[in-house]
Image: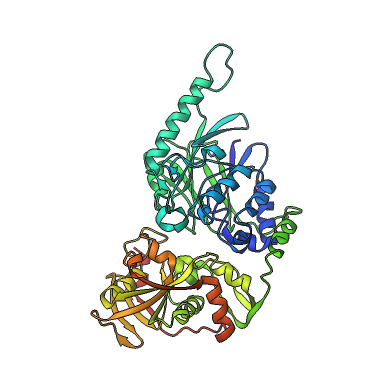
Amino acid sequence: MVRLVHYSDIENVFDSPERAARLAGRIRALSGPDAAVVATGDTTAPGVLSLVASGRQVIDFYEATDTALDTFGNHEFDYGPDALRGLVADAPATFVSANVRDEAGEPFGRDEGVVPRATLEIDGATVGFVGVTDPATDSLNPMAAELSFDDPVEAARDALAEMRTAVAERGEGEGADGPTALDHAVVLSHLGAGDDDLARELDVDAVLGGHVHSRRNDVVAGTRVVRPGVNGETVAEVDLDSSVPAATLHEPDGATPVPGLADALAERMAAADLDETVDVVDEPIERTGEVVHGGECRVGNFVADAFRWAHDADVGLSNAGGLRQGDPWVGAVTKADLISLIPFEEPVTLASVTGAELHDVLREMAAPDVDFGEDDWWHGHVSNAEVVWDADAELVLEAAVGGEPIDPEARYTVAVSEYLLHSEHEYPTLAQRHRIDEADIQYEVLAAYAREHGIDPEIEGRIEIRNRTAVADD
């Protein structure tokens, strides 16, 4: 049997060292001499411990799980290209990347050991891998702005062809005893929705994906397409020994934690001294994907209120994708908990927009034109604004600020994360030209707001989504 054990987007699993050790235990239990462990990005960041360790906590995890290969997600670049180069050079796993180019336009990280393709011998079979990253990463992540990204399908196709040629040449000639062809070909992908294109366009057995934080286990054009979700909620086991590979998603609950891993991660965390309690919460505040992408929610209102408070703005706006999932807040909420929610060292900026532009921004909360996430996800949270959205017609039916309809000719100030002024992927109406001021780093703003006003958000009817069921059932 030839198997792959696949994880992706584990992000802030490291903020709970015991949970990370249990996830590693599940990976170890699934692995074996007939298997290889591979990952598909957003394994180093984001998260509290990631911020503390600049992503290097993943080295402990790679060693604990004997991870062979990984590829770059958009968050691998959170601490800049140079920090990532250093991590790549020291990591026991090999990074496979065919479409990322550095500041000079050359393939990224080649001097540090990044390869466009790789082969592994697994239980007597030769398995080839290529890796690709979302080409919108330079827009998604300001720290990757100086990099460039080739078309992932073309880059993967070229890398596969080169790999097949290299394997054939390696098996030829006098005295050669190597294989003359790949037994299996696999794409390690951090594209999300683009995985279907890879499956349709390339001659591969499986596309192991990430980026979108929902689970997937499908067959597209005869190719197995797998995505294990976020924060280590599942591990994929892929059996390549059939015409269409089979896959099973395993949860980590019940696994024996890897000895020593939790202690190593906890030691890294303790050095950060983030145990300050900023408030005490009586009613649990949920922060699951279903909650933050489901429309108005308490944690989204808290963040949007804090952003608006930091600038005394007309409107506060938070993108739902910027709120990282995790355990609910209940009891003492620490600064580490706030960082776990928004673990990005970016300031809360102030933008000045016209009423017409603000109306467009509020429409973009529904992201009808953005290829990101599931079709029914909601992508924003607001403070001092009210929006009624018709999901069937994809129209804003009502939009108000402070209880008054938006005046298209007036100007409004909006407090947002710096990311939204940089990215063309979400909220494309907002841009650097709208920037007029900035406040502290986002999690510092949350901490200051919590100390002064507490953490007790309510659902107030800020966002109403009509006809959502009809869209979700299509």
Q: What percent of the width, then of the height, locates residue 262?
A: 72, 58
Which residue sits at x=39%, y=61%?
423
Is 61 left, or right, of 224 in this rendering? right
- Quadrant of image for the C terminus: bottom left
Which residue sits at x=56%, y=79%?
448
> 62 or 467, which lies in front?
62
Q: What percent of the width, then of the height, locates residue 373?
A: 42, 60
Using the rendered view, name the quadrant where residue 2 is placed.
top right
Q: What percent of the width, then of the height, locates residue 363?
A: 32, 71
Q: What percent of the width, then of the height, locates residue 403?
A: 34, 88
- Quadrant of image for the N terminus: top right
Is 118 located above or below residue 252 in the figure?
Answer: above
> 173 or 116, which lies in front?
116
Can residue 68 be spotted in the picture?
no
Quick one: which residue is furthest to the left in this view?
409
Which residue sits at x=53%, y=13%?
173
Which residue sits at x=34%, y=84%?
401
The number of numbered discs placed on residues in the rendered structure image is 0
